[in-house]
Amino acid sequence: KAGVTQTPRYLIKTRGQQVTLSCSPISGHRSVSWYQQTPGQGLQFLFEYFSETQRNKGNFPGRFSGRQFSNSRSEMNVSTLELGDSALYLCASSYTFPLGGYTFGSGTRLTVV
Amino acid sequence: KNEVEQSPQNLTAQEGEFITINCSYSVGISALHWLQQHPGGGIVSLFMLSSGKKKHGRLIATINIQEKHSSLHITASHPRDSAVYICAVRYTGNQFYFGTGTSLTVIP
């Protein structure tokens, strides 16, 4: 059974650009959540989707957005990148919402220069 | 403001020792998760708790809802247990908050 797949694994972008990250959940999982991890702030919750609907959103500016498709795959987008957006972005999938167990992807390492 | 408090921040143990990591939170929760993160970033979900106690191999997780406190215990610790352990809570409003993590090093 394939795990949670995140693409790309590494990304370097210039300040002001935008970026789209992708997450393919485990087959059959309908909930996908996104997290940002930085050395200074640790893990922070971005948003969570279930059945193509955003169910929950963390305290991030509107530059951070996401969506979930009918096949449960999810994308997150960050517009007008700032240096502080450099982080490891993790997604996790779960069979149910909100009390499912989570399986995490390996993450996308974003560097903004 | 960090909604989840973990202790200790760093922990060094000799192989075979019994280890306890603590997590406290502030208001009502729907679930508490214990996560393990090895160097390189991969995160594994160890437990999800809403009450009582769960055990998996040498790992035991407990939660006391009244005291708003959870503990993760590792019995007979092994160097492969060296990792960062993170407590995460889902509050009843469905917001997720994470502790700052406990960095565990087990020395052979």
Image (cartoon, rainbow, N blue to C red):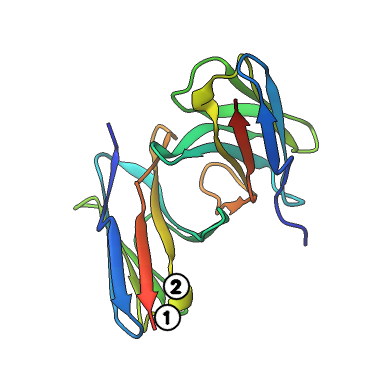
Image coords of residue A87 (percent x, y): 54, 36
Residue where numbered disc 1 is placed: B78
Q: Would you place residue B11 above or below residue A29 in this image? A: below
Q: Is residue B81 above or below residue A30?
A: below
Residue A53 percent location from the top left of the image? 65, 27
Label ID, residue B81: 2
Gap between marks 2 and 1 measured at Cα: 5 Å
Do tags 2 and 1 sit on the same chain?
A: yes
Q: For residue A113, what is the image quadrant?
A: top right
In which quadrant of the rendered image does the C terminus of chain B lie? bottom left
User: Left or right of B42: which side holds B65?
Assistant: left
Nearest the camera: A25 or B1?
B1
> Closer to the camera, B25 or A13?
A13
- Secondary structure type for disc 2: helix
Name the chain under label 2. Answer: B
Q: Which residue corresponds to the image point at 60% horizontal and 26% vertical from the top-left?
A: A54
Q: Residues within 10 Å of mark 2 (few under 14, many from 20)?
A: some
* Residue sticking out furthest to the front: A113
Q: What amino acid is at disc 2?
A: Asp
The N terminus of chain B lies in quadrant: top left
The quarter of the displayed image where residue B74 is located: bottom left
Q: Mark 2 and 1 residues: CB-CB less than 8 Å, in contact?
A: yes
Disc 1: CA contacts within 10 A as few (<14), some (14-19) or many (>=20): some
**Amino acid of disc 1:** His
Residue A10 in sight? yes
Q: Residue furthest right?
A: A71
